[in-house]
């Protein structure tokens, strides 16, 4: 078909016009989302909690060329308040919006907008409290124990959500002959003026009024009360709210008791108690001094320097923070046999030089390289001496002795009880690096020392392999670092004789080797996603020292060992000096303050370490069966199990009760006749052992229950107090207990032991 030239021109013009009007399909196209920017709605000024912001939140999405994108899904999230939609689509201008109703808590709140593959945009708003709507009392019902008992009542003005409002409140008592109220602006001090009475208080702020009930309890143990009739050594146990009152019977000549309040909620709480005896009890003499039947013998080496346990606590925390994120990738590298894990490290020869990072203040950065010479090699140890160590230190026979002792004592005892360590460098040995770097950790002229350390970073590969992140400063070896002699005080003017360092080193080997085993098995064998909690890792390391004592001395658990027994021969003396004395010194630190210390608080402080070591020994004795199995279970928990959950899995599901009974044993064992086995420490005569390292005095203090006024005491989670009281001849005595003006909680238990 032929067209006329004019028609062809007309058709061509029409096509061009259509292309201009519709756009050229072959032209530039919009790319994927590349940018998300905040348009409006951020920082709109203060707004009342629970209110909807005046402006919507808006963001714009564009591609790499800055072209606005239509129909892109935007996800909206907020942790406070509510958004009008969880997602929305961008419009023709690339903008997506949502409305935000603030949450109920005053303060800065945030919301985010997210597009897949891009960093989110964050909006913030400051929420302020609303108008006065209520008064919040710290306790709607307050229990006061008797005349003179006081309670600090908070009466706080608040909006409808409970946010504080700046407005003073006033508190009035309905009957001041029962309770008086001394106002302090946001509450009042309530003081009981009568017993066995009930009244109300009235709190006022503006037009808002709130009332509360005040109960002043009757004196405890009135005539005809039911009372425990205990023989010397017997214990009455009451728990939870039932422990709010206790009464015991005096004999024809009277009786004396120790009350042990204990609290446990495994949340780190502090329980404040008030106890009122209402003049039903009498005073007793303190019995803190050691039983005179226990002859005090001056502890050998009692003038030695004390070990700086704080350094190790900081090191464990540093390891946890810096190394835990690297665990999954390190384990994956070993399983895949990539990077350094695919190589075997040859066993060096005596005389070889090794460059080792001895930095203890950083895990994977800032290497401090020390050159060491291999001075001895045994079946299980490579002994290395820093070439820069001070002169006149250990000799070659000394180093060989440490290698032999590690082979014949430390290695078999620790591996039997905790398991074999990993062998990442495939040489079946542990490096013992004796280096002045350890001496340098003690500042000039101090009365403490650092005996050595294990650093978990040395278990990690040094370089990245594929997706595996490395620890660049790792020595990639099973190893630890040890103190060296410095007779002239070359390092920081701190003199360290060879005899002193020799004595503390053997115990350090046992202690640090447990840490190495524990960390390496968590990392490469047991599949854990974290290292063991500090308190339990340290407790097991101290138990390793005790196990060394038994092996080296020839003594065994369950023998109720006294200090005199540890000094009965040179063999037991040396074993005690090397492996035993430090545990009792740490336990002494716990006994001096049992109110706020606990065996399972997750820190590595000295009192905690003393407590967890003592409890683990108590638990092993009470549990019976194979000790080695129990230690192995604790050092090798399933993935995800650690700390308290590890104790409840390997020892007892009723951990609170065991710690409670252990707390009683700390007072009663080898002191009060007739006590039950659960209230004893079968392996050690603690009165003898701890008194020997405390200059003849038993360090556990007791507090006299006030006979006429309220006794106040605070105990932490896993902690106990020791309150002594007497009951007159043929009388009934006891007390009432409240916890911050209320009944005692479920986690509270009271053990009442008759002592005389």
Image: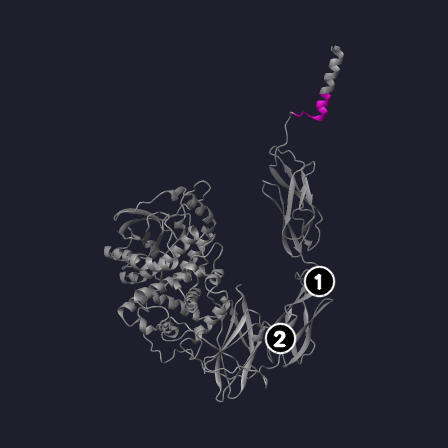
Q: Secondary structure at mark 2?
A: strand
Rendered location of residue 643, percent (x, y): 47, 60
Rendered location of residue 611, percent (x, y): 43, 67
Q: Which mark is residue 355?
A: none
Residue 18 forms part of the magenta stretch: yes
| Pointer 2 residue | 143
Report the magenta residues as a range: 16-25
* Near-viewer residue (575 or 526): 526
Q: Is residue 73 above or below residue 662?
A: above
The reply to whether the C-beta atoms of the residues labelled 1 and 2 are less than 8 Å apart is no
Q: Nearer the viewer, mark 1 or mark 2?
A: 2
Q: Secondary structure at mark 1?
A: loop
Q: Is residue 250 above or below residue 52?
A: below
Q: Crowding near pointer 1: few (<14 within 10 Å), some, many (20+)?
A: many
* Near-viewer residue (128 or 425): 425
Dominant SS of magenta comes to helix
Quarter that holds the C terminus: bottom left
Please state if 92 lies on the left or on the right of 538 as rendered. Answer: right
Q: Is residue 236 above or below residue 413?
A: below
Residue lying at 30% horizontally and 70% vertically, measured from the top left: 300
Rendered location of residue 647, percent (x, y): 47, 62
Quarter that holds the N terminus: top right
- The mark total stands at 2
Residue lying at 74% horizontally and 67% vertically, measured from the top left: 207
Evaluate whether residue 492 shows in this view.
Answer: no
Evaluate whether residue 41 shows in this view.
Answer: yes
| Pointer 1 residue | 132
Rendered location of residue 74, percent (x, y): 65, 42
Looking at the image, which residue sits at the far front? 625
């Amino acid at each position: 078909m032929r067209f006329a030239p004019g028609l062809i021109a007309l058709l061509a013009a029409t096509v061009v016009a259509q292309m201009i009007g519709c756009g050229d399909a072959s032209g530039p196209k919009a790319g994927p989302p590349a940018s998300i920017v905040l348009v409006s709605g951020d920082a709109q000024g203060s707004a009342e909690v629970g209110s909807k912001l005046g402006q919507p939140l808006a963001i714009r999405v564009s591609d790499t060329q800055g072209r606005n994108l239509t129909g892109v899904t935007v996800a909206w999230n907020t942790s406070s308040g509510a958004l009008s939609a969880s997602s929305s689509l961008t419009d023709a201008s690339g903008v997506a919006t949502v409305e935000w109703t603030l949450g109920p808590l005053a303060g800065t709140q945030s919301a985010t907008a997210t597009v897949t593959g891009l960093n989110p945009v964050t909006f913030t708003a400051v929420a302020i409290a609303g108008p006065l709507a209520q008064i919040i009392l710290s306790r709607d019902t307050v229990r006061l124990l008797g005349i003179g008992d006081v309670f600090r009542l908070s009466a706080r003005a608040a909006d409808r959500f409970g946010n504080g409002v700046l407005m003073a409140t006033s508190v009035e008592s309905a009957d001041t002959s029962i309770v008086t109220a001394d106002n302090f602006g946001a509450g009042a001090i309530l003081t009981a003026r009568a017993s066995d009475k009930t009244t109300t208080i009235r709190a006022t702020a503006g037009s808002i009024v709130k009332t509360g009930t005040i109960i002043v309890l009757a004196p405890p143990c009135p005539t005809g009360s039911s009372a425990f009739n205990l023989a010397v050594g017997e214990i009455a146990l009451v728990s939870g709210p039932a422990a709010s009152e206790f009464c015991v019977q005096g004999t024809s000549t009277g009786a004396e008791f120790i009350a042990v309040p204990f609290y446990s909620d495994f949340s780190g709480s502090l329980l404040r108690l008030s106890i009122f005896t209402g003049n039903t009890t009498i005073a007793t003499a303190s019995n803190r001094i050691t039983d005179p039947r226990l002859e005090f013998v001056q502890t050998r080496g009692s003038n030695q320097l004390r070990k700086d346990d704080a350094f190790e606590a900081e090191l464990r925390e540093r390891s946890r923070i810096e190394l835990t994120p690297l665990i999954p990738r390190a384990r994956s590298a070993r399983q895949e046999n990539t990077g350094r894990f695919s190589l075997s490290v040859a066993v060096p020869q005596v005389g070889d030089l090794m460059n080792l990072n001895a930095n203890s203040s950083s895990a994977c950065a800032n290497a401090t390289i020390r050159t060491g010479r291999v001075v001895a090699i045994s079946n299980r140890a490579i002994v290395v001496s820093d070439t820069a160590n001070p002169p006149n230190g250990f000799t070659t026979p000394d180093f060989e002795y440490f290698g032999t002792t590690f082979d014949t004592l430390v290695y078999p005892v620790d591996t039997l009880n905790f398991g074999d360590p990993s062998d990442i460098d495939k040489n079946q040995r542990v490096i013992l690096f004796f280096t002045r770097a350890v001496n340098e950790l003690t500042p000039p002229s101090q009365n403490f020392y650092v005996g050595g350390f294990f650093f978990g970073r040395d278990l990690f590969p040094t370089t990245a392999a594929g997706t595996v992140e490395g620890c660049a400063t790792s020595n990639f070896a099973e190893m630890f670092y040890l103190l060296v002699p410095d007779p002239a005080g070359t390092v920081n003017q701190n003199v360290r004789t060879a005899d002193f360092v020799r004595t503390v080193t053997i115990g350090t080997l046992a202690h640090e080797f447990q840490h190495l085993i524990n960390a390496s098995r968590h990392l490469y064998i047991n599949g854990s996603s974290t290292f063991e909690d500090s308190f339990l890792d340290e407790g097991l390391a101290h138990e390793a020292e005790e196990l060394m004592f038994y092996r080296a001395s020839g003594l065994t658990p369950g023998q109720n060992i006294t200090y005199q027994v540890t000094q009965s021969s040179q063999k037991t003396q040396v074993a005690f000096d090397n492996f035993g004395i430090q545990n009792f010194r740490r336990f002494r630190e716990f006994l001096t303050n049992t109110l706020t210390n606990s065996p399972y608080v997750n820190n590595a402080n000295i009192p905690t370490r003393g407590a967890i070591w003592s409890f683990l020994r108590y638990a092993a004795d009470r549990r019976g069966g194979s000790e080695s199995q129990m230690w192995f279970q604790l050092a090798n928990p399933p993935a995800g199990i650690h700390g308290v959950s590890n104790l409840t899995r390997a020892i007892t599901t009723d951990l609170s009760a065991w710690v409670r009974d252990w707390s009683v044993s700390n007072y009663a064992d080898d002191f009060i006749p007739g006590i039950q086995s659960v209230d004893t420490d079968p392996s050690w005569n603690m009165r003898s052992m701890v008194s020997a390292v405390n200059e003849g005095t038993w360090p556990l203090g007791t507090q006299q229950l006030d006979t006429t006024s309220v006794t106040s005491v605070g105990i932490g989670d896993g902690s106990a107090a020791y309150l002594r009281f007497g009951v007159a001849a043929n009388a009934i005595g006891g007390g009432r207990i409240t916890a911050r003006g209320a009944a005692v909680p479920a986690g509270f238990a009271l053990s009442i032991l008759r002592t005389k």
